[in-house]
Each structure stands twice: as structure tokens, then as C-alpha cells.
Image (spheres, rainbow, N blue to C red):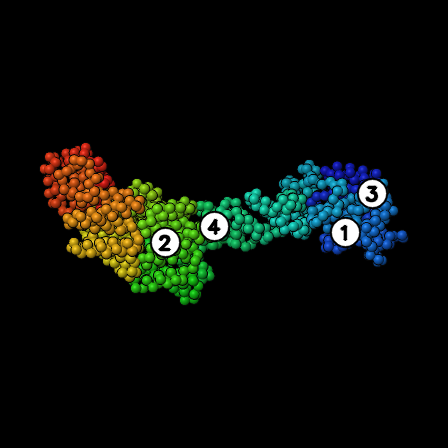
Amino acid sequence: MTGPPLFGRDRELAVLDDLLATGGGVVRFTGPPGIGKTRLLEHAAAGGLRQLGATGAPAERALRFGALHRFLQPVADLPGCPDPVRFAAGLGGPEPGEFALFSAVHRLLAELGPLLCWADDTQWWDEASLTALAFAARRLAGLPVVMVFATGPGFAGPDPLDGLPTIRLAPLDDTAAANLLPPGARPELLTLAGGNPLDLRELAESGGETVPADGRQRTAYRRVFDALTPAARRFVLLAASESPLSQAEFDRCGVHAREEALASGLLASPVVRATLREDTAPAMATVLGEAALRAGVSEEAVHAFERAAELTSDGPQWLIPAARGAWELGRTSWARQLLRRAGDRLLQGEIELRDGEPAVAAHELLTAAESLAPSETSVALMLAGEARRISGDLRGFAAIAVRTAQLARTSDAPGVRLAAAHTRGLTATFSGRHEEAVPALEEALRVAPDDVRSQVWAAEAALSLGRTALAHEYAAAAVARARIEAVTTLPWALIHLGMTAALLDRHRAAVAAATEGLAESAGQRTCAAENLTVLALSAAQLGDAKAARKWLDQAEPDLDRRSLGRPRAIAAWAEVCLDLATDRPAEALARFHTLSADTGHAQPAIAVLATPLLVEAAVRCEEPEYAVRGLRVLDGWAEATGSVQWRALAQRCHGLLARDPDAADKHFTIAVDLHRLARTPLELAKTQLCQAMRLRRDRRFRDARELLGDAARLFERHGADFWAGRARAELRAAGGDPAELTDGDLPSLTPQQTQISLLVAGGKTNREIARRLVISHRTVDHHLRNIYTKLGVRSRVELAAMLAKRATAPPGDGTGPGSVSFS
């Protein structure tokens, strides 16, 4: 006996015994390797009948009549054997036609009866041999011949035995299978084997979880797998991997491939699937990786990549995209676990940069840079440099600039050249060495490759050169590429798109970019915080205090927990805008005093960009000397870069600080012209508002009204309703736009007395009114005495009560139409 006992095959044995008893008939048994087909043939052969038989040989599958040659050899030399049969048996003679051969075989078998003919593993028989036997099998009526076929999976092409009586052997039930287990065998082997007798026996003998590498079953499964069509092999690999995949991935293989795969028996039990995973690991990993790529950003894809990594020794090839996918899903902890197994410190550092502590990120990235190729080293150094800049560690950033310069001496790759020029240019800029910074930054623009990271870094270089519109274009290109090529970089690219849009007074675009960036920032808390501060800054610049406060409150927890100096500085910038908009110049100036302490480290670029607010706060607090140093830095930056936008802001600042009216007019006029060239409409309108207030103070009301009308229209056109209200209030104070005053509304007061009255009603002190209107405290006292006399009131309380009844929109907190500001 060569196989396990035939437990659980009563039906099949009854069919065989009936055929043997009647002495004629045909049956075919099918099923996977080891299911018991050969044991049934052995049972039939033990019945005592004369027999002919042959087992299929995979190596001869393509050999025409090779199996028939082996089948007929025992009888080919008998007296009277037909010539066609002798030819098929290799004994010479003329080559017969197929029909003549098939007829001769049929005649011979009939003459030899009673006879048992058996054919095992017919899936490995050549088609011509199997067709010859099938021809005879269909013509057994009345003949003393029993024919028994055993067919396993693997037959390619049309099946010559199709239509013959067929029984598919089912797996044994647990009771029958348990009878095959030797004493002391593990019960779980029943589940592993899935009712396959030979699998169960080999598992029991080896004690493993898969059939032995040198065993009969392993060889059989390999042959079956190799015989499958490519689509069916792919289906088997996907299913045997036991990785969660969508139904669509299996549907891609096609219905026929699915049927072929399921019929192969290779998916029938845990032990077969495990055996396949061992034997086909590289191919299975590749198929899983391809499926994961198609699955896109999903847990299914990450698990598929993980499974692929488990199957091969080249795990990092699959763990890195798995980690990136987990990160895109916002599962940062999962991504970090995967990266620890992959050993990729570059991606680990980038994740830390976007979602953790900048100092830790810099350490990871600098360590990664020690063992990478030059192109990847430059990326690691640039990301480390960004980590230093976010935290405001300018000394650490300068050290990275030295390393990129050293790298550039050994490699001229575009990414390396970009890194060297970019870091050199920003280091010089932060130190005020503009003659060195400008050519380096311009070189960075020339050599920047067109990948997402490089486009963002080019945007930074362009912004440092004062070319905000160009920076916006680079940022837009980075966003477009990130959406297609590298989704994890999208929130970061959108920060720069939103910031440059805000600096160009394109606040709707800024809000759209930062809102998208916030939505895409799952697993990237640093990017979320920066996008929130961009939203806050944009709202604050428009004067929308409610929206700005909402975004700042959302950003605050992350700003407090981690060393995020750059977003903290942007948040402070927004706070200063709100302070000035709500008539708190002293608080604004105090923020500049403590800006370094608030952010923890230096953020010189943001400090320079916020200089106009510093100048305004200093002027309104009557401390202009505090603004002189900051303005000197802005002047140097604007002059060195030639930036029209920065020159415009610098000229506005000089206009605010100028004591001589003619000098102030000159600076403001130049600023207005430059704003128009820079195409920054809201900054233009704010400069016009500042100039108009200076003109009104110098009692040049007509000139002031013209500017204020223009400013109000610009503010309204660009959605800055708050500032439009400010401009209209200032227009009323300058004696313009009388349609906005109701009949009998303070008719006896001058425009300036009207404005002072409204500010008093809003709760402002004389000193606050003096700062707002840039007049002396004594002048406010003088005007108030005249106001009391004209209106017949004796106190601030009575004045406020009168205005509460008569004014159409009295200011309360400094944000109504009676409020004014320089910014």
C-alpha cells in the first residue's frame, strides 16, 4: 500500500466495486494532489483483473503519444497485435492515421478483456494519448473492459475525457481524517490539512506547518502552479497571500482565471496556501506590491505592502511604501513602526519634521545623510535645514549650509547644487549679507529640479528675493505635482501657496490653499499648525478678528507643545494685525518687544515682513525710535533684492515716520506707485489710508478725501469689509461722503470733532484717541471742551448717551465705522 487507507470513500469504492463486478464500464476521479485518486486506482488494481496502465509524466506532456507508448508496451509484442498499436508502442512500422490508431487500440483492448485499464495523473498525459484512450472509453458498451481515470489539476487546453462519468473527490470530514492521524499527533493538523489525506500524513510525519520541501505533495503543488495560466497564477498568489484585498483586485484576473484557480486545489487548505507562500514568495510579494499600488491610499494597501515585506528578504522595498501609505492615512505611529523595521531614517526624519519635534527631526535627518547617495543626502540635509529653520536654530542651519557646500564639491547633481545654493543664500540673508545672498538664491532658482520638494524650496528662494509672484508660481507647481506624485508633501506645499497668496493680497486663494492644506494634514501636525496660522494671518490682514481668533485658538495647543518657532512667529504676526485693527498699538508694540521670547528662537524673515506693523505700532505709541532699526533691515533687504513689493512697504514706513509733510508725501506717493507695480491692492489701499490720515492731520481734507474714496473702493472690491469701514469712517472725519450721516447728526461739529466724539462714545481714553489720530493729548482736551460747549453736555457720559440716540452706528470696541487706523 503506497498511500493512506481509504477512510471516508465509501461512495467511490462502491462505484469501483460495481464496475469490477459487472466487468465493464468507465469512471473518472478528479481532485487536488493527495486527495486519494491514486489510492482508488490501487484498490481497483487489487481486484485481480488483467490490467494495463500508465501514470502521467510532466516531462513528456508535450511528447505526442508518449503516454500511450508507456501504456501499450506490455502488450505490443503479443502475436497478432495490430500494426498501429505496434507503431504507437515504438516497435516500428508505417505511421498510421489517427483514426486507424484509435480503432486499433479499441480493438486490442476488447480482445484482451476481461481487462482493467487505468490512467493516473492524466493531466500530465499528452493530448494525443489521452484522446486515444477516451475514444476507446466511449465505446465500451458490451465489452469486458473497465477503465478508471484519475485526473488532477493542471491540464491545459480542451479535455479529451470531457463527458465521461466523473466523480470529484471531496475533502475528508474530520471523523474520517482523524482515523489517519498517528497516536499523539496534533489535533490542529486536521484544520491545517483541510481534509487532504496525503497532506495530513506528510504533516504528521514532518511536524511542520507546511508539507516537507522534499515531499511528494510539495512537488505536486509546484507542478500544478506552474501549469496554470498567468491570470490564474496571479489569482492564486493574491488569494494564498491571505492579505486583505478588494474584490476588484480579484476581478481583474477574470472569471476563467478564478475558476481555474479554484479548481487547482491550491487554495483548498491552510497548509497548501502556506506551502505556496514559501515556494512563490518573491512572485507573491511582487503581485501584492502591484495590487497595493493600485489600491491607492488605504489600509488594504498598507497591509498588502506589509505582507509583501514578510514574504521576502528584501523587506524595505515594501515596508517603505507601506510606511508612506500609513502616513498618508494619518496613522503616524503605524508608519513609524514600519520604518523601524525598514531602517529608513530619511522618511522617519521627514515624518518627525511634519508631525513631531523639529529638533528630533533634524537629528534623524542628519544621521540619515551620513549613509545616503549624494542626491538623497542633499534631500536629507535640506529637510534637516528646514527643521532648524522651523525651530529658529539659525546657527544649526548655518552648519548645514557648510555640509551642503562640502557635498557640492563632490557632486554636481541638480538637487545637490540646489541644496548648496539655497542654504548658502538663506544663511547670508539671515545674517544681512545681501550681496552674498542674492546671487546664491538666484542660482537656486536656476538649478532647481522639477520635483515637489525642489519646487517648494525654489519658492522659498524666490520669496527671499522679494519675488513673491514668482514664489507663488513655484508653490503652485509644487502643489500640482504633489497632488499626483507625492501626496504626503501636499500639506507642506499648500502652506507656501497660501502664504504667498496672502502676501500678494489674494486672500481668497490663500484661504482656499490653507483650508485644503489643513484638510490634508492628517498625521502632519506641524503642517496643520502652519496652515492654521496662514488662515489666521489672512483673516487678520482682512480685519476679520473673529475668524483670525478661531484659527489662532485651534493652532495654539500644537504651538505650545512643540518648538514650532516659525508658525508661532506667524501667529504673533497675526496677533499684531489684530492689535492694531482693534486700536491696541501698545499691545502690538509689546509683542514685538517679546517676539523672540514668544517664538523661542529667531525668525528673521517673518520679522522683516512684519516691519510695517512695527513701524505703525511705534508711531501710534509715540515711540518712533523703536522702529528705526527694523526699518533699516527692511531697507537693506529691499535695496539688495530690488523687490518692488518690499520697496513699497519700506516707503510707506518712511512716510509714517517722516516729520516733514512734504517728505511724508513724497514717500507715500512713491509707495503708491510701487504697490501698483507689485499688484498688491490691499497694501496699496492701506498706504492710501495712511497717507490720507497724514493729509487730514495737516488739514488737507480734499486730498485726503480723494485717497480715502479710492482706498474704500479697493477694500470693498477685495473683500476687506472691515478696512472698507475704516476708510469710510476716515472719509467722514475728513468731511466727505455726507450721505452717510443722518439729518441733524452732530451738525455743529467739525469732522475731527465728530471723530473724537465717536471715539469717546466708544470708550476710548484721551490718550488712546491721541494715539489713534496722531495728535497730542492737549489737542484732544481742547477739542473735547469745544464739543461739550457746542452740544450742551457736561461729561463724557452725557456725550455717549447723546450719540447712542442719534448716531446710526456708534462704535463700541473700536471696530465700528468711526474707528480709524494707519495699517
Determine whether the residue tagged by mark 2 lies in a helix, strand or loop: helix
Label whose residue precedes the other's in the sequence (3 or 4): 3
Residue occupied by mark 1: 128
Q: Identify residue type, mark 1.
A: Ala
Q: How far apart are marks 2 and 3 (CA)?
A: 86 Å
Please name which of the two marks, 3 or 4, marks the residue nearer to the observer: 3
Q: Which numbered disc covers residue 140?
A: 3
Give the quadrant of residue 782: top left
- Label 3 environment density (alpha carbons within 10 Å; few <14, some 14–19, many ≥20): some
Residue beneath the point at 58% across and 46% down: 252
- Gap in angstroms between the C-alphas marked 4 and 2: 27 Å
Q: In which quarter of the image is residue 1?
A: top right
Q: Which residue is disc 2 drawn over?
A: 472
Most extreme residue toward the right is 79
Instruction: Read off the residue under disc 4.
Output: 324
Is residue 559 visible in the rendered image? The answer is: no
Asked if disc 1 and disc 3 are in contact, CB closer than 8 Å, the reply is no
- Crowding near the residue tagged with mark 1, few <14, some 14–19, many ≥20 C-alpha atoms within 10 Å: some
Single out the residue that lies furthest toward the front: 739
* Residue 648, x across and y down, in percent: 26, 55
Label 4 secondary element: helix
Instruction: Give the mark, 4 or 2, whose residue is nearer the N terminus.
Output: 4
